[in-house]
Every structure is written in C-alpha cells, then in structure tokens.
Image (cartoon, rainbow, N blue to C red):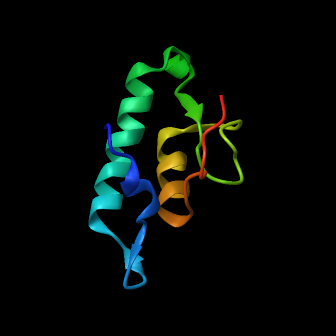
Amino acid sequence: MDDLSWMYRRLMDNRLHLEYIVDVRRFINFAFLIDKKCITGKNKCPYMRCKNKKFLKEDDIYKHQLNKAFLLCFEN
C-alpha cells in the first residue's frame, strides 16, 4: 500500500468509488494485522472526527470510512 491517493478519491459521480471500497477494507485488514493493540479487537479510527484517537471495532471503522472520509494527514 505505497500509493495512498485512493484515500482521497472516495466519490465518483456522487457514488462510492469501487477502488475506495476495496482499498478501505484492505487498509483496515492490514492495520488490524500489524497493530499489537488489536488484542482488544479495536484499533484507531482514521475518520476525521475520531482523529486517530478513538479505538473502534473493525466493522465500525469500515462504516466510518465508507460514510465519511480519512483525515487529510495522520497523527501519531
């Protein structure tokens, strides 16, 4: 996942872009795979309002990202 430009191409003709839907799932799967804190079944949500500070379950993060958008820049 070197090219993250897909994160900012969420909509196409007022519909979710297929590439976005697929890559959101890949991104979340990867995040849960590499993050050791996932023992709790939760991970940081990159949705704008969550600001990478709220820990949510995988399905909730997926819903946020399909219905909303990623932060323009990630915080540590």
| Front residue of 72 and 61 | 72
| Front residue of 8 and 40 | 8
- Does residue 71 lie above or below 38 as drawn? below
- Does residue 7 lie above or below 43 as drawn? below
Percent coordinates x, y for residue 22 in the rendering: 29, 54
Percent coordinates x, y for residue 6 in the rendering: 37, 56
Q: Residue, x 41% and y 20% (percent of image)?
A: 34
Count of residue discs: 0
Residue 12, quarter of the rendered image: bottom left
Q: Residue, x 43% and y 66% (percent of image)?
A: 10
Percent coordinates x, y for residue 21 in the rendering: 34, 59
Percent coordinates x, y for residue 8 in the rendering: 46, 60
Residue 56, quarter of the rendered image: top right
- The quadrant the C terminus occupies is top right
**Outermost residue, bottom side:** 13
- Does residue 60 lie above or below 33 as drawn? below
Q: Residue, x 56% and y 31% (percent of image)?
A: 43
| Front residue of 58 and 17 | 17
Q: Residue, x 55% and y 60% (percent of image)?
A: 69
Residue 40, quarter of the rendered image: top right
Left or right: where 74 falls relative to 2 = right
Left or right: where 50 falls relative to 28 = right
- The quadrant the N terminus occupies is top left
Left or right: where 11 falls relative to 74 = left
